[in-house]
Image (spheres, grey):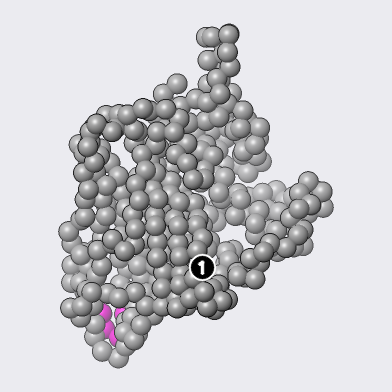
Amino acid sequence: MKIPGSIFFCCFPFLLSAAPDAGRWEISADGGIQSELVRLTGGKDHSDHIEMAGRSVNAVVKWKVTGKGLVELDRWVRWPMLREKKDDTHAAVNHGFRSQDDPVPLVDGSAYQAAPASVFRIHGMLSWTEASGKLAVTRTVFPSLHLPCLIERWEIRNTSTQAVEIRIPVTAKEELLPREIFLWSAHIMRTQWIGGGRHRLMPGEQLLTGMVFSGRQDNDPAVFPDIAAEWSGRETFIRELESSLILTTGNPVVDRLFAFCKLRGAENVLATRGGMMHAPGGFNRYLAAIWCNDQNEYIGPFFPFLGDAAGNEAARKPSFRARAMVCANTRSVPQSISWKS
């Protein structure tokens, strides 16, 4: 299905005005946007953030790149089905994972030192490439489709003329949080590399590895995702949404904006014990819950046009849940409903 651009601009004329940061990024042929260091920073520090989600995890990744190209991350990860003790509509557990706290690989016996990044990309994932004298490393941050974890994929290529030894950390870094602040049990926040051990890269060879940032109840097993399969699954999810309900306005910036909006709306449908629920997103912990009017008025009517099955289920949820509660208590209409209602 295609949407005529004339209808779109009549509804949203403000999109015709230029954004203040319009010069930082350019549209890429693969469906995303990209930039290079000088264009993005102008020689000064630049900060931004991006929100992403899978069915069991949501994350706001705050990222900063210095004028010299060094990247810092503050990954604010939330889990819809890990609950704080109050267990209200704002009780999804969250935890911050900062890049300066990450365990790092060893390169020929020395700790890996992040090199200046040269190219930055956003296409349903955040990625950048940093290169030193020996290695070119492309790092890509994205959520697992179904597991409760955020993934940072590292593609490491030996660009030197000599063999390079890479030692990936084998021991996970865990933090136990006390039972008293949670609904059911103590929780474990975990950072772990996948593909730990010694790897010898000959010139031109590359290694696929990465980190997993997860949270779980202390009696649940840790997750060990297949990073290549997870990356491929995320790519497929993005492509399927891009091929549905295509907006064609003649303005490639607006068309790309609409494609990004489709993804942001559909990926934030979260799997809960109460079924699929759409989360509003942003800097909050309003996950595994619904506003009784918002989803009905805004994203809900959009999903049937998009044709996303999980979105359609989430669109039905507010009406059915609110109706049941109103019928049970005719004196008031609920403002919000959590997963357990």
Query: Is there any visible trace of residue 36 in the rendered image?
Result: no
- Magenta stretch: includes residue 60: no
The answer to whether residue 316 is above or below residue 217 is: above
Query: Is there any visible trace of residue 45 in the rendered image?
Result: yes
Q: Position of residue 314 (x, y in %)?
A: 53, 33
Image: magenta residue range: 201-206
Which residue is identified by label 1? Answer: 46
Instruction: Pick whichever, 315 or 191, lies toward us.
Output: 191
Q: Tag 1: residue type?
A: His
Residue drawn at point x = 34 percent, y = 74 percent: 114
User: Left of 268 or right of it: where is 81?
Assistant: left
Residue drawn at point x = 43 percent, y = 46 percent: 58
Residue 320 in which image quadrant: top right
Q: Position of residue 117 (x, y in %)?
A: 44, 75
Residue drawn at point x = 30 percent, y = 91 percent: 161
The answer to whether residue 33 is above or below residue 144 is: below
Question: Outermost residue, bottom direction?
Answer: 161
The answer to whether residue 83 is above or below residue 211 is: above
User: Left of 184 or right of it: where is 116?
Assistant: right
User: Left of 16 or right of it: where is 62?
Assistant: left
Instruction: Pick whichever, 332 or 306, lies toward us.
Output: 332
Q: Position of residue 300 (x, y in %)?
A: 61, 35
Name the image quarter holding the C terminus.
top left
